[in-house]
Amino acid sequence: MMAYKFALDAIDTKLEILKEEFQFLHDYNPIEHTKSRLKTPESIMRKMYKKGFEITLPSIKHNIKDIAGMRITCSFISDIYRIQEMLAGQSDLKILEIKDYIKNPKPNGYQSLHLLIEIPVFMSDRQEQVCIEVQIRTIAMDFWASLEHKIFYKYNQAVPDRLLQELKAAADSATALDQQMERLHTEITEIKEGNLELEEEERNQIRISNQQFEIPEALLRLMGGEDPLS
């Protein structure tokens, strides 16, 4: 259990670095918040008995892949895949499995991107490869999943059909909201990029007697302290 805790600490540190770097480079943070959890030994044993696996430590490590779990919540759908790419680009991480419940939602409406990631944990006397389940979803997806979990917990799995239909309708509404917010996000990004290009053009021009002139490139380099012959 200690190795799994250290694995969560390591992935959390990686995410903090990626967040700060992305904020610095793009003035934007794709991660709203993260949450991690470790399964209790009791929960692990129940799952082993339920699935009929042999009760040994190697069997637990081989068969139970979600002992350590990390949930990453984003504002926009595009952020989910951006974070997946950033994690895949880490040389010491290995993505073992991808389950995309966004492109292929579950029948009940559940959406999320699930990754099984193997991360090295360096102990005092050995190195262990530890598996973590990472779930990446939007705020709307997370809100729906939390509500669905509470309803199933309250009814002990026997949820009335009427509520199941309303849950599916709520999932469809959450999807429509995510798609609308994604469109707005794209449009705002395009406007921002256009404004930056306009500001750059204005910086490279000079106005004399109400007439606008392009500043020669050599002069721009001199103004910037660069040698025009370099």
Image (spheres, helix red, strand yellow):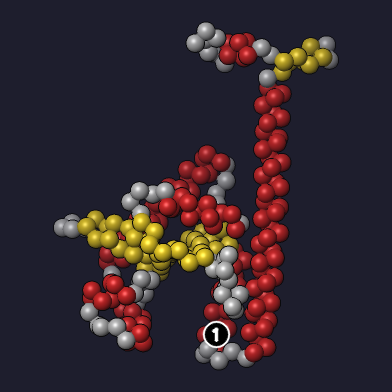
Image quarter of residue 172: bottom right
Of 128 and 155, which appears nearest the observer?
A: 128
Q: Residue furthest left?
A: 125
State whether residue 28 is above or below residue 112: above
Q: Residue furthest right?
A: 210
Which residue bears the numbered disc 1? 152
Any part of residue 211 in sight: yes
Mark 1 residue element: helix
Residues packed near mark 1 inside 10 Å, few (<14), some (14 to 19) or many (20 plus): some
Whole-percent x and y of residue 219?
62, 10
Query: In screen coordinates, is 169 left or right of 44?
Result: right
Query: In screen coordinates, is 15 left or right of 41?
Result: right
Whole-percent x and y of residue 60?
28, 76
Task: Tell me which amino acid carries mark 1.
Answer: Phe
Whole-percent x and y of residue 169?
69, 77
User: What residue do we see at 55% from left, 9% from top?
Assistant: 228
State whether residue 161 is above or below residue 70: below
Whole-percent x and y of residue 76?
61, 57
Image quarter of residue 130: bottom left
Looking at the rendered image, the quarter that the N terminus falls into is bottom left
Any part of residue 147 in sight: no
